[in-house]
Image (cartoon, rainbow, N blue to C red):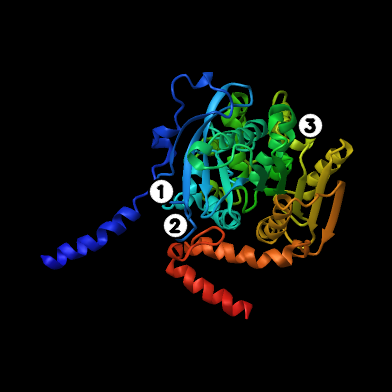
Amino acid sequence: MKFLFLLLALLAPIRCAILLPTKPSRDPFYNAPDGFEDAKVGDILQYRKTPKAITGAFFPSKVENSWQLLIRSEDSFGQPNVFVTTIIQPFNADPSKLVSYQVYEDAAKIDCAPSYAVQYGSSITTLATQAELPFIGVLLNQGYYVVVPDYEGPKLTFTVGRQSGQAVLNSVRGALKSGNFTGLDASPDVVLWGYSGGSLALGWAAALQPEYAPELEPRLLGAALGGFVTNITATAEATDGTVFAGIVANALGGLGNEYDLLKTTFADDANLLMKFRVNQFDDFCLVDSLINFVGTQFFTGAVRIFRSGFGLLDKPGIREIVEGNGLVYFDAVPKIPIFIYHGTIDAIVPISNVRKTYQRWCDGGIASLEFAEDESNGHVTETIVGAPAALSWILSRFNGDTPVSGCQQTKRLSNFEYPGVPASVLEYFQSIFKTIVGAGLGPDVQKDQVSAAERVLERIWARIGS
């Protein structure tokens, strides 16, 4: 009996530690409170400490604090809505520096939301977002506050540009109003970063900012856009019938969640035996969608889901919606410095439309646009290879270095060759490893905040450096 009591006592904290975070579909915090429409966009409607620790992939991340904020925003039609954003504070944080990190959620389901996925114990179906936590850890280890918005909003409008871009900007607005509980300055320097689906939201935010949030311009030092999505049709053409076909399903689900005409048209045009597949477009997160829709042909082939093939996207009313959510067609030009990094052989987001957007912004007189083209990497590998270049660029923004003047496009065999990368790459991989093993994140972490895993890590890096 004594042994059983002792065993239960030892297991109790473990049981508490592995209690899973509540999914957004069952969490009332995500619901809009009464009268929220009267608040201004970017206002904080309510906030709380993050229910569970921030995940580092395998272990909880060790950070000073984290919060969830419910922010007032609006959809593509100007109708009021709300979304959750997460603010993370590292140890020894610099309250004058904030990075807005847009994850590639790439799903049209509420339980895939980043605010849920970044918590330790979230479902394995959110693995794609969890895989980005090491990149967030790199920023935290620099001492930057990081804000991670659920930019798809309450309807989960994946690939809907205006909704996503507005949410990114309103998330920054909310973060700047959070100082009374986060300690963040009211006027910090802000840099934004996003890859793939995150770049879609961020690209729209950068383009919308001059008109939608002009008061933020003095605070915004720039935006880094990787695997830059500017034409959602091109991605559908590139991935239809491939191992990445699940992206098409989730994109169609996100568009259908915002536009009733699309949802109705998808159902009407689907082959009789494939209608059940249309109903699954908003059922999965990215990882399980890739599994469930692997090799699925939506627009091509004899056994495709839609009878009209790609002609479906040219139907009256449909084409306007699809092109209206393609940044490559949008006339506005960002006013803040922009850094683009992209793989030449990207088979998911073809580089041709990135080049078109680059040229469009250059022709529009953008003040600072740098394009780092990686000739040897595709979409997945550039996530890793391009990140040190993005980090180097972000560090230079916060350090006060002058960005390029006008437009500059450079092709390199690898973006590991980007200026400043050799100096930052060790810090980059060290920070990633610290995030994964649950070591303390932040500059000059005190010894009483250092985990056993981090002490092992220090010995490893000491050997590497010797």
Q: Secondary structure at mark 3?
A: loop
Residue 235: % across, % down: 70, 45
Residue 248: % across, % down: 63, 43
Outermost left residue: 1
User: Disc 1 designates what residue?
Assistant: 52
Viewport quadrant of the C terminus: bottom right
Question: Badges 2 and 1: C-beta atoms under 8 Å apart?
Answer: yes
Residue 341: % across, % down: 75, 53
Mark 2 Cα within 10 Å, few/some/many (few <14, many 20+)? many
Q: Which callout, 2 or 1, points at the residue further toward the start of the chain?
A: 1
Q: Which callout, 1 or 3, points at the residue further toward the start of the chain?
A: 1
In this orientation, does residue 139 appear?
yes
Question: Badges 1 and 3: C-beta atoms under 8 Å apart?
Answer: no
Query: Quadrant of the rendered structure where residue 331 is?
Result: top right
| Residue 279 vs residue 213, the one in the foreground | 213
Q: Is residue 115 left or right of residue 307?
A: left
User: Disc 3 designates what residue?
Assistant: 332
Q: Secondary structure at mark 1?
A: loop
Residue at 67% across, 43% down: 189
Residue 289: % across, % down: 54, 47
Q: Secondary structure at mark 2?
A: loop
In this orientation, does residue 267 appear?
no
User: Disc 2 designates what residue?
Assistant: 60
The amino acid beneath tag 3 is Ala
The amino acid beneath tag 1 is Lys
The amino acid beneath tag 2 is Pro
C-alpha span from label 1 to label 3: 40 Å
Viewport quadrant of the N terminus: bottom left
